[in-house]
Image: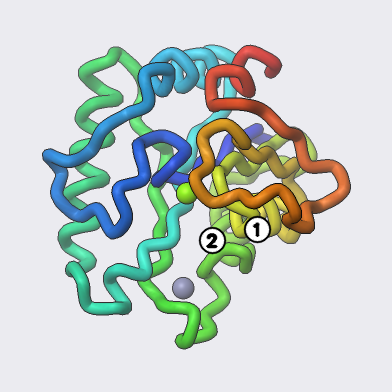
């Protein structure tokens, strides 16, 4: 079985610009590249699992999301890294009550089955409570990047065994 790290996109790998849809606006945290390198060198398959409700809200098209993801995969290649094994995103709004929008775990559940992943050896990393709950519900270890989050108020209810780190590099260095 494989081990994997499921990564949120906005606020985790790239700076959260709220409903970003232009590839040229993709901007990484200064430590993202090194962190991704460490994760791959540690033998993890890497995935992106992202809520993109801007599609359901009509702010941009699914095709725009694919272009942003192509840019990210191109950057991985130019850094000498393997591309993300898969990039999953939920296009729905909260009102659509789908099973894929985090904190629901369906995106992870599907990837775990498809890529023969051992949840016990795997992590879900993000900057919001929705990310850690999606991780918890799918059986992987949830990781919250406190120092990267614009959204935490400090009184959030988190899964009991959530791992807390300042940023993605700090997490990667503890693998
Ligand atoms: Mg995020
Ligand atoms: Zn969805």
Mark sitting on residue 134 = 1
Contact? badges 2 and 1 (CB < 8 Å): yes
Badge 1: residue crowd in 10 Å (few <14, some 14–19, many ≥20): many
In the picture, residue 11 is in which quadrant?
top left
Badge 2: residue crowd in 10 Å (few <14, some 14–19, many ≥20): many
Q: Is residue 22 above or below residue 123?
A: below
Q: Position of residue 97 (x, y in %)?
A: 53, 84
Q: Which secondary structure, mark 2?
A: helix
Q: Closest to the observer: 119 or 29?
A: 29
Q: Position of residue 15 (x, y in %)?
A: 35, 38
Q: Residue furthest right?
A: 160
Q: Which secondary structure, mark 1?
A: helix
Q: Position of residue 98 (x, y in %)?
A: 52, 80
How far apart, in angstroms, are the residues tagged by discs 2 and 1? 9 Å
Q: Is residue 152 above or below residue 40?
A: below
Q: Closest to the observer: 60 or 36?
A: 60
Q: Which mark's residue is nearer the viewer, 2 or 1? A: 1
Q: Specify how the rendered protein is coloured.
A: rainbow
Is residue 112 visible in this depiction of the protein? no
In the picture, residue 4 is in which quadrant?
top right
């Amino acid at each position: 079985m494989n081990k994997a790290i499921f990564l949120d996109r906005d606020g985790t790998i790239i700076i959260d610009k709220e409903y970003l849809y232009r590839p040229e606006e993709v901007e990484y945290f200064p430590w993202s590249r090194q962190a991704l390198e460490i994760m791959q060198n540690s033998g993890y398959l890497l995935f992106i699992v992202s809520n993109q409700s801007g599609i359901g809200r009509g702010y941009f098209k699914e095709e725009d999301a694919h272009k942003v993801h192509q840019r990210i995969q191109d950057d991985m290649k130019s850094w000498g890294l393997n591309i993300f094994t898969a990039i999953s995103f939920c296009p729905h709004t909260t009102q659509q009550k789908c099973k894929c929008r985090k904190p629901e775990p369906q995106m992870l559940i599907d990837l775990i089955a498809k890529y023969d992943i051992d949840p016990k050896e795997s992590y879900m990393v993000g900057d919001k409570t929705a990310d850690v709950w999606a991780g918890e519900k799918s059986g992987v270890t949830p990781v919250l990047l406190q120092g990267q989050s614009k959204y935490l108020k400090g009184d959030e209810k988190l899964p009991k065994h959530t791992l807390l780190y300042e940023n993605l590099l700090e997490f990667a260095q503890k693998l």
